[in-house]
Image (cartoon, rainbow, N blue to C red):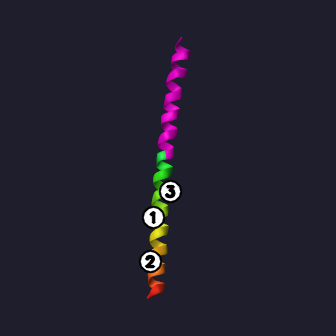
Amino acid sequence: LRDECQLKVKEPLSLLINKQRLNLAGEIADKVLKKSRQKAESCYLSSAE
């Protein structure tokens, strides 16, 4: 019984951790995209002058 309980508890925890990792990865990707977009825009603006 104890092993069963541990297995049931472990699975949702790992799912939660995976979700948090995905969210973190998504946030980092967003930041990187925003930075590269800003760079591209500033390059475009400076070349347009």
Query: Of all residues shown, which one is farthest toward the bottom?
Result: 49
| SS category of the residue bearing label 1 | helix
Earlier residue among tags 1 and 3: 3
Bounds of the magenta segment: 1-22
Determine the CA span between mark 1 and mark 2.
12 Å
Earlier residue among tags 1 and 2: 1
Please, is residue 44 above or below residue 25 in the view? below
* Residue 19 is one of the magenta-drawn residues: yes
Q: Name the residue under label 3.
A: 29
Q: Mark 2 points at which residue?
A: 42
Determine the CA span between mark 1 and mark 3.
8 Å
Q: Where is residue 14 in the image (x, y as percent from the top left)?
A: 52, 33
Query: Of all residues shown, which one is farthest toward the top?
Result: 1
Q: Which amino acid does label 1 sit on?
A: Lys
Q: Name the residue under label 1.
A: 34
Please, is residue 40 above or below residue 1 in the view? below
| SS category of the residue bearing label 2 | helix
Q: Position of residue 32 (x, y in %)?
A: 49, 62
* Residue 34 is one of the magenta-drawn residues: no
| SS category of the residue bearing label 3 | helix
